[in-house]
Structure formats: structure tokens, C-alpha cells
């Protein structure tokens, strides 16, 4: 089967699942919540936010453990649910007496259905953006796609966003539905669930949550109330028209932006839309594995040639690459907005307070002056 | 979840794993250069049908995959018109290539590819082609020459001119073939070395750029230049080609960057929005001028 056909099938399947579902809203009495989770466990592995020490992380939820929805957002994004930080691709033996010596074999993996409960709309939209990288006309990443296809995304609307959230101007929002199969909103002693796809419908059926509710108003008022609370913004209008080389060549701006960076890589680690990876072989005795690990454009070794030459050998070049990729190259390549959903994790966790909102505004402003200069 | 299971099943059957190399056996190893740092490896596919799947064009590359060590992207030195094997010339430089240099005939490893784009053969039909190569970047140019002078293809191209240089006679790749090509009248060969004390050396002495200036045909709308070499050679060859009248859309180059996946996903080899592994490695100078040149 050629890749073009595979691509068509993928799109068909997605369109179908969106089309077949009449958007409907279901009410879930909180008293029935845990019971529903138990029913779900028969068909899904459940994953949800769990508080560990001071922060929430996505963890598999064993029998008896419900997701903890008393959180702003998880410390690390939900990208690891379909794209683990470290993942085996192949295994092999280096034992020359074995018949299959040096032959790479697929590692058996669990792609049984799983459901992530309480993913924030920003993280769900981010998965859709990352999919553009792993699901292309030319190549399909089988590991990412299988994990993605096995996952049902059950989002939780954000009624109390953080001060660092800027999703509403980053192509997303506290009630954004892109990438979600179900969107939950807290409604006092019940949850209301907007069922968005066929996958979502199957999930709700498996849980036994089928009681329809007239709660459109809850979603609408909740959405506008939450959006109003998000006061921090970015400007992105001029990024598309900005001249790539002029923006890239503005050394003074990049010197200012990158001055305090220590290239720790935290921003790329916590970012829901950063997807870069490394491939490494690891050997124990005669048994070897080829694995892929998250990597970071912040590290010099990311691009160094064997000769020692490094096209992005300086901190300025690496910081520039990160922001140019997210806010310019991606914008130009896919015409799907910026490669950022406004989750604010990098803003919160950067040890030297580099703020993508400021960088985005600087780049956008530069794009504006650039456009004026051309017009003038 | 019966509704989900068929879809997942379906997907598993549909997706070919682009990370899985074809298993190959090392069939022959030739030491190419006097410093013994360059060896040519001839590989034979363990499964015959894999050779058909590895359907490549001159200018493409592949990941040589050594279990336990890793992978390395290398230009394909054999030509699509050569059947029954694939060939790569490898400089001993890092972990994988050093290990490969210590492997022996009969050893099993993997090849993943073909990867990247290739020289624009359809566009080059009916045109004169100038190939400028330096050092061990001559591998995909060898693939190209063998392709163009194949009896089935030679009539598709106009004049073929080759300028190829190395530091010394002993550092030239594919010496026997070079001598054969020198003798042909349907390809204009200009071999050169930076310096030599060999009194029997009957070819050029001098760096590639001045030899190109002296020997290469004038650039016009029917003539294209393909340039592969170390950065310093490329730097000084570009003004020579400009002087000869080659416009930037008729200067074709092959770039290198650190790579892992080779399929445009791992994110490190980009020059701006272009990925060297997937959108390249072959670009015209005009295209490269539009990028931040981070290579």
C-alpha cells in the first residue's frame, strides 16, 4: 500500500468519525463518576492527572484511583501519552551464534485502547499540531500514530486559567475542542460532557454515561467567563508576512532574547508542541535495543557534525532556532498558525524568565516594521 | 471496544515502518585512499525483494545501520543502473563509521532508504551537465556519471564535463573508473590534485576552482552545474561558476547536516523551514539563498 493511499484512508477515517456524530451533551452525576471509571477500565487503560509532591502529572490510574481534577495544568504536557520520553523501536541480538544475529525486530507494545481524562484543551490542540510532523504524505511514524489512534482524548475545560495562560491569542482557548473526543466541564454536582467524535461516543457508552442534558448554555457561559479571565496575549498577525531572512538576521533582537538563556532545555521538555527526538542504540551484554528519546534544539550536540563543525554552535543560534521554528518556519510551512498553544509552561518554568509572549511580540512587531518598510 | 479494534488492526497493516532497515550482507570492501580512511562497501540485500523496494535515483542517500552502534546517513555511490548490489564509500570519522571500517565481508547490518530527493534528472534531460567534485564528496557524483553514461541514458544528455580533485593522487576515489572515463570521448574528464611529486602524474595539478575556471564550459540556459565538495571548495567554486555565466537556479548542490531519522521527523537538520533530509539534500543555490544557511 503506497503512502498516498494510507493518507487518504487516515483522512477519511477522521472525517467520518467527525461527521457521523451529532454533537450531543451528556450529564454525568458525580456520584456515578467512579462507577463509570470502573466500567471504562474493562475496555481502556485510564490515564489522568495525579498530584505528586507539589505538581500534577499524567499517570496511569489503577483500580480505585480517580483522576484529580483539582489542578490548573500538569507540570509536563500530555505529549508523552502518545509520544513517550523514551521509547524502544527495535531489539536485536549481537550474539553471532544466533540465527537472527544483527537483525532488528519490532518490539512488542501495548496499543490497546487508552483514555486520557482531564487533558486540557491546549494540550489536546498541541497533539493535533504535532501530528502534522508525524503523519505526512511521504512517511507515517508508526509508533506515534498507533499510540494516537489507540487514545481517546477526554478534555477538561479550564474555568480557572493561570496568569501565564495565553491560549486565546495562540489559536486555542479554555473550551477549545480541536483534538478532543469529549470535552468535560465541571457543573457543580455533575460534569457535563460534550461528545465530539465517534471515539468519544464509544467512550461514553463504555462508561454507561448516556443521559442527555440541555447544557449548551453551561458551555457557552463557561467559555466566555473563562476567556475573560485570560488577560495575557500574544500578537501573531504579522508573523506570516514577515521576511524570514530579515527576521533571522536581526542579531540585535536575538542577542537580547537569548542573553540570559542557559540552554537547559526545560522549555522544550515541558512544551506540548516540541517533538524533536534522538535515536540511540543501547546494549546490555549481547542484547541491544534501538530507542528514541526526546531531544532538544537547545543542546549543542543536537546539530554538531562529526567534523566538529556546528551550524548552530552558539546559544544565540539555538534560541533563535527554537523561536523561529515555532513562530515562523512552522507558520509558513503548514499555514496552521503558530506552533504554540499558549499553555504557558515554558514561561512558568524557565529558570531565567525568558518569556515566549515577549519574544512573539518582538517578532511580530519586527514583521510589522518589515512590511511597512517594503510598502514604503 | 469492538468499534475501535478494527481501525487499529487496519492501521497496523497499513503502516510500513520507515525506521526499519533492510538487512544486508557486506559483500566486498575496497580501501579507496592511501590514508586508508575511505573504504567502499558493497552490500547485498538478504531478501531479494528488498532490492526492488530500495528503488533509488542518483543523488539520494541512505542510513547505514549497525545494530549496537547506530545509524549514519551516507550518499549512495552505486548507480540505479547497477543491479544486484548497493555501494557506499565511507570516511572513518565517528562511532558508526569507525565500527563499520572494522567490519568484514559477510557481516550482517542494515540499510534504511533510499532517502531524500535526488539530482533533477528529468530537468537535466537534453542539457549539458557540469559536475564539480572535491575529496570524498564524489560518491553521488560517481552514481550520477555511471547513470548518465549508461548506454540507455547517454543520448538523453548533452555534453558531460567532470572536474574532480583531491589532495593527492592517492586520495582520489574510484581511480580505475576515473582512468576508464578519461579514455572515453563522450565525457570530458578533468582530474586534478592539489599537489603531487609523482613524475608520472599526467593529469591536472591545482585546486578545483581554478581548474573549473579553465576547463568548464560557459554557463547558459542549457547548462547546469552540480557541485559536491568540502565547504572551502564550494566557497571558491561559486564565484568561478558565476563568472562563467551559471545563474543560481542552474547551480545544484547537495547539503549535509547532522541527521537521525532521515524522514523529516526528528527535527535537527533543518535550514529554516526546509529539512535537509527530506526536502533535500539536493537544492539549487537559488533555493539555498532563501534559507538561513544553517548547515
Image (spheres, rainbow, N blue to C red):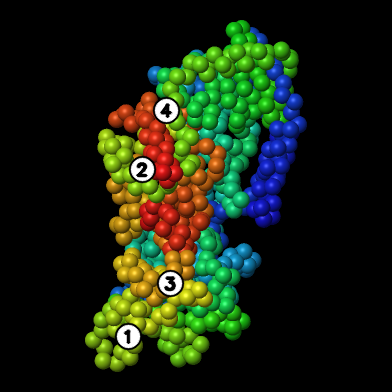
Residue denoted by label 1:
B204
Query: Foreground residue, B78 or A177?
Result: A177
CA gap, disc 1 to disc 4? 61 Å
Quarter of the rendering occupied by the N terminus of chain A = bottom right
Q: CA distance from mark 4 to mark 2?
A: 19 Å
Q: CA distance from mark 3 to mark 2?
A: 33 Å
Image mark for residue A320: 2
Q: Name the subunit of mark 3.
A: B
Q: Is residue A164 above or below residue A363?
A: above
Around disc 4, counting alpha carbons within 10 Å, would you say few (fewer than 14), some (14 to 19), or many (20 or more)? many
User: Foreground residue, B70 or A185?
Assistant: A185
Residue A42 relative to residue B268: left or right: right
Label 1, residues with CA under 10 Å away: few <14, some 14-19, many ≥20: some
Q: Residue at x 36, y 69 (%)?
A: B238
Q: Give the side of residue B235 with respect to residue A281, left or right.
A: left
Q: Are marks 3 and 4 on the same chain?
A: no
Q: Residue at x 34, y 47 (%)?
A: A249
Label 3 Cα crowd, 10 Å radius (few <14 / some 14-19 / many 20+): many
Residue appearing at x 58%, y 65% in the figure: B54
* Among the two numbered marks 1 and 3 on one chain, the one whose residue lies closer to the N terminus: 1
Instruction: Describe the element under mark 3 as helix, strand or loop.
Output: loop
Amino acid at each position: 500500500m503506497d503512502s498516498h493511499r494510507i493518507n487518504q484512508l487516515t483522512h477519511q477515517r477522521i472525517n467520518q468519525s467527525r461527521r457521523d456524530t451529532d454533537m450531543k451533551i451528556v450529564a454525568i452525576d458525580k456520584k456515578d463518576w467512579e462507577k463509570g471509571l470502573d466500567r471504562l477500565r474493562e475496555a481502556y487503560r485510564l490515564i489522568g492527572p495525579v498530584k505528586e509532591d507539589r505538581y500534577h502529572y499524567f499517570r496511569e490510574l489503577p483500580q480505585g484511583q480517580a483522576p484529580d481534577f483539582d489542578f490548573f495544568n500538569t507540570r509536563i504536557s500530555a505529549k508523552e501519552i502518545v509520544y513517550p520520553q523514551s521509547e524502544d523501536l527495535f531489539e536485536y541480538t549481537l550474539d553471532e551464534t544466533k540465527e537472527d544475529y544483527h537483525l532488528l525486530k519490532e518490539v512488542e507494545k501495548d496499543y490497546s485502547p487508552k483514555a486520557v481524562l482531564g487533558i486540557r484543551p491546549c494540550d489536546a490542540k498541541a497533539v493535533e499540531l504535532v501530528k502534522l510532523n508525524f503523519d505526512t504524505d511521504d512517511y507515517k511514524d508508526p509508533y506515534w500514530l498507533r499510540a494516537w489512534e489507540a487514545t481517546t482524548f477526554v478534555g477538561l475545560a479550564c474555568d480557572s486559567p493561570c496568569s501565564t495562560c495565553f491560549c486565546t491569542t495562540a489559536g486555542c482557548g479554555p473550551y477549545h475542542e480541536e483534538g478532543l473526543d469529549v470535552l468535560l466541564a465541571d457543573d457543580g454536582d455533575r460534569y457535563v460532557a460534550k461528545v465530539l467524535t465517534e471515539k468519544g461516543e464509544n467512550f461514553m457508552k463504555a462508561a454507561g454515561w448516556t443521559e442527555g442534558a440541555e447544557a449548551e448554555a453551561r458551555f457557552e457561559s463557561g467559555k466566555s467567563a473563562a476567556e475573560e479571565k485570560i488577560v495575557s496575549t500574544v500578537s501573531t498577525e504579522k508573523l506570516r508576512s514577515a521576511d524570514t531572512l530579515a527576521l533571522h538576521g536581526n542579531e540585535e533582537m536575538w542577542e537580547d532574547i537569548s542573553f540570559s538563556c542557559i540552554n537547559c532545555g526545560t522549555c522544550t521538555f515541558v512544551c506540548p508542541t516540541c517533538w524533536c527526538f534522538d535515536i540511540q542504540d543501547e546494549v546490555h551484554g549481547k542484547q541491544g535495543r534501538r530507542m528514541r528519546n526526546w531531544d532538544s534544539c537547545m543542546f549543542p550536540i543536537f546539530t554538531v557534525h562529526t567534523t566538529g563543525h556546528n551550524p548552530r554552535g552558539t546559544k544565540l543560534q539555538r534560541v533563535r532556532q527554537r523561536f523561529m521554528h515555532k513562530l515562523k518556519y512552522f507558520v509558513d510551512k503548514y499555514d496552521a498558525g503558530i506552533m504554540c498553544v499558549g499553555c504557558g509552561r515554558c514561561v512558568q518554568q524557565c529558570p531565567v524568565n525568558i518569556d515566549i509572549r515577549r519574544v512573539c511580540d518582538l517578532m511580530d512587531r519586527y514583521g510589522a516594521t518589515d512590511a511597512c518598510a517594503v510598502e514604503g | 471496544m469492538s468499534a475501535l479494534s478494527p481501525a487499529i488492526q487496519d492501521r497496523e497493516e497499513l503502516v510500513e515502518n520507515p525506521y526499519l532497515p533492510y538487512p544486508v550482507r557486506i559483500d566486498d570492501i575496497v580501501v579507496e585512499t592511501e590514508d586508508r580512511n575511505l573504504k567502499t562497501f558493497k552490500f547485498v540485500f538478504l531478501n531479494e525483494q528488498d532490492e526492488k523496494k530500495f528503488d533509488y535515483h542518483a543523488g539520494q542517500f541512505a542510513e547505514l545501520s549497525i545494530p549496537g552502534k547506530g545509524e549514519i546517513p551516507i550518499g549512495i555511490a552505486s548507480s540505479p543502473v547497477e543491479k544486484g548490489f548497493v555501494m557506499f564509500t565511507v570516511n572513518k570519522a565517528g562511532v558508526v563509521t569507525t565500527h563499520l571500517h572494522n567490519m568484514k565481508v559477510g557481516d550482517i547490518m542494515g540499510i534504511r532508504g533510499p532517502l531524500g530527493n535526488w539530482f533533477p534528472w528529468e530537468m537535466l534531460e537534453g542539457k549539458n551537465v557540469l559536475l564539480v567534485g572535491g575529496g570524498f564528496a564524489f560518491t553521488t557524483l560517481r552514481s550520477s556519471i555511471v547513470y548518465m553514461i549508461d548506454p540507455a541514458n547517454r543520448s538523453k544528455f548533452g555534453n558531460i564535463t567532470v572536474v574532480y580533485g583531491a589532495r593527492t593522487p592517492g586520495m582520489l576515489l574510484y581511480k580505475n573508473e576515473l582512468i576508464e572515463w578519461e579514455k572515453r570521448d563522450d565525457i570530458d574528464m578533468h582530474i586534478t590534485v592539489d599537489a603531487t611529486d609523482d613524475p608520472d602524474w599526467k593529469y591536472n595539478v591545482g585546486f578545483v576552482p581554478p581548474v573549473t575556471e579553465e576547463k568548464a564550459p560557459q554557463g547558459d540556459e542549457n547548462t547546469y552545474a552540480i557541485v559536491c565538495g568540502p565547504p572551502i571548495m564550494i566557497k571558491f567554486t561559486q564565484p568561478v561558476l558565476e563568472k562563467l555565466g551559471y545563474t543560481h537556479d542552474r547551480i545544484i548542490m547537495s547539503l549535509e547536516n547532522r541527521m537521525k531519522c532521515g524522514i523529516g521527523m526528528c527535527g535537527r537538520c533543518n535550514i529554516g523551514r526546509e529539512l535537509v533530509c527530506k526536502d533535500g539534500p539536493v537544492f539549487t543555490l537559488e533555493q539555498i539563498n532563501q534559507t538561513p544557511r544553517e548547515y
